[in-house]
Structures are given as structure tokens and as C-alpha cells.
Amino acid sequence: MQDRNIPSHGAPFSLPVEVSHLTKSFGSFTALDDVSFSIAQGETVALLGRNGAGKSTLIGCLMGFLLADSGNIDIFGHSIASLPREIRARTGFVPQTMTGFGTFRVAQLMDYIAAFYGELPPVDPALMAWADLDPRKMVRSLSGGQKQRLAIVLAMRHNPEFLVLDEPVASLDPHARRDFMNLLDSYTQRTGASILISSHILSDLERLCSRLLFVRQGRVVLDVPTETFRATTRWLEHPTPDQVLAALPADIQILGQRPDALLVHGWTEDLALPDGIQTVVPDFEDAFLEITAPRTTPAEAETPNAAA
Ligand SMILES: Nc1ncnc2c1ncn2[C@@H]1O[C@H](COP(=O)(O)OP(=O)(O)OP(=O)(O)O)[C@@H](O)[C@H]1O
């Protein structure tokens, strides 16, 4: 149930986020290649990929800091190219690192940012208790983790309906990180907000997120509800995986391959498999490593039932 004070301005049934065929290059390097996905209300989506996969570039385009070469992004039914101010006010963004504002005191900066949003409800006491910031301290005197907490408070202060977090927990200690993940979970439950979060702490993402968006070399290679991923992603262990590959139906997606196993998506109990195959539930980190490992040849990237 939503309890926010910010009115809805988008089209009645518009999705919070729709990204279609987004492409972004830096010179001759393609950082995003035909990326499409959407985020529904109340979804918490994990953005997963290796260093340099294109996560921050995608986030930059979503937040309107970077201009895509082609494709489109709609936020609450409005194109990012001409996002009305009141729609932008329904979004929040936590950057990888907070820079600037060093000469502000914490309370001053919170008031300064809040002023951009007009009338706001009181700050969520749970958020402030978690952040545990001294309002009198100068921003430049905060530790790295404290700056990160401040960035999170500033991004969530106005109860955004779409919150984007770019590696928000990298400088948080394990206590602060765990508590923040719980806070984020209760925030989405309480408000129905949609979230896109990028992090290299895979266990957090697997626990918190309802959907997984794997990015490899600028392309979305798997976009799947977390429950479906758990239920249908399996290692098929066999001494000759190529034989298994030949026997699989075309709708089974191959996510990775070891000398003695295939990682597949789309497995079900009643899938007819050749004799001698061991079916093993993958460890999430192992699966991540397989799915996001770079592919070197165009054939690997383009094979129809490969993870392309
Ligand atoms: N302004 C830029 N100019 C040139 N290349 C860039 C620029 N910004 C990003 N890139 C390149 O685009 C690719 C994607 O970068 P991006 O920052 O989106 O990766 P990422 O997935 O967020 O990585 P990380 O996990 O390390 O934060 C990288 O190869 C990077 O070097």
C-alpha cells in the first residue's frame, strides 16, 4: 500500500520504467547494445554484471545524466528526453560515491536538498536512526561510510517511487549494510516503490530482489524473476556436455558451460534428459560467474540457445 504524499502524475497504467532498444557508445566502444527491459510497480530489480559491463552507463542514461545514442527510456510514462520536473521528483538516486557539498553541515545539506521537493512529510525515523549522522558535522569531515549513508538519506528523504542505487553499500560496514538491506525491503513493502540496485554483494541482491537483470558486455543476457531463476536454473552434469546440448529442447537457454557440465535456464522436473545426467542447483555466485563471463567470439555471443 502506498502511503506517500507525492501525487501521481503519470498515465494511469504506465510502468515506472520502460527501456527500449537503448544503445550508448563512447567513441568506437559500445557500452550499451540494444538494451530493453521494464520495471513494474513494487519490483526490486538487481542489476548484475562484471566491472565494465555497462551498469553505471545504464543508470546514467536512466537518470538522464547520459544521453543515449538511440532507443528510448520512459519513466512513469514520460520520455527521459523531456521528463517533467514533477516526474523527476518521484525518483531518487544514490550514486557510487558522493562528491561535493563538503562545506555544508549535514542538517544544512538535508534542508537544502529537501527544498527542491516542496512540502515533504517528516523524515522516516527508521531511516534517520539507521544513518546515525551527527547533523552538526561538516560533510567533508564524514567518513566514507557516513557519506554513503548521507547520500542514501538524501535520495530517500522524499519517498521516491522509483529509486536507483549504484553500488550503495560498497563502503558500508556489514552491520550497516545488512540493516540497510532490511530497511530497503520494508520501504518497498510499505510504499510499493520500484527499485533498481546495482551491487557486487550478490547474496544481498539474491535475498532482496524480486528480479535479476544480468548484463554482459553491454547487453542484457538474462532478465528473470528471482523465484524463476531459483526454480529453473540448474547445472546438468555429464562427462560430455556437448551430447547433452544436442538433446536439449530449443527453449532451454544455455547460460554457461564447464568441461563436465552445462548451466541451463528453463529446467523443469519433467524435462526429458539423456541418461546419466546429474542435476545440481547452482550456487548463486557460481551462476553469476558463468552468466557474466565475457564471450570472445561472435559465434558464442550469437548462438540462438546460448546466453546471448
Ligand atoms: N565517459 C566514458 N568514456 C569512455 N568510456 C566509458 C565512459 N564511461 C564508461 N565507459 C566505458 O564503458 C564501459 C562500461 O562502464 P560502466 O561504468 O557502465 O561499467 P559498470 O558495469 O558500471 O562497472 P563497475 O562494476 O566497475 O562499476 C567500460 O568499459 C567503461 O570503460
Image (cartoon, grey):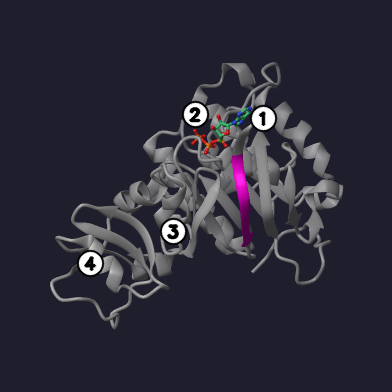
- Looking at the rendered image, the disc whose residue lies closer to the viewer, 4 or 2, is 4
- Looking at the rendered image, the disc whose residue lies closer to the viewer, 2 or 3, is 3
Category of crowding for the residue at label 3, using alpha-carbon neighbours closer than 10 angstroms: few (below 14), some (14–19), many (at least 20): few
Which of marks 3 and 1 precedes in the sequence?
Answer: 1
In the shown orientation, is residue 275 left or right of residue 49? left
Q: Which quadrant of the figure contains the N terminus?
A: bottom right
Which residue is more in the foreground, 291 or 129? 291
Which amino acid type is shown beneath numbered disc 1?
Gly
Inter-mark Cα distance, 4 to 2 = 51 Å
Asked whether mark 1 and ligand 1 are closer than 8 Å, the reply comes as yes
Which of marks 2 and 4 precedes in the sequence?
Answer: 2
Asked whether mark 4 and ligand 1 are closer than 8 Å, the reply comes as no
Q: Is mark 4 on a helix, strand or loop?
A: helix
Which amino acid type is shown beneath numbered disc 4?
Gln
Q: Are marks 1 and 3 in contact (CB under 8 Å)?
A: no
Inter-mark Cα distance, 3 to 4 = 17 Å
In the shown orientation, is residue 89 left or right of residue 192? right
Q: Are marks 1 and 2 in contact (CB under 8 Å)?
A: no
Quadrant location, ligand no. 1: top right
Q: Name the residue under label 2.
A: 145
Which amino acid type is shown beneath numbered disc 2?
Gly
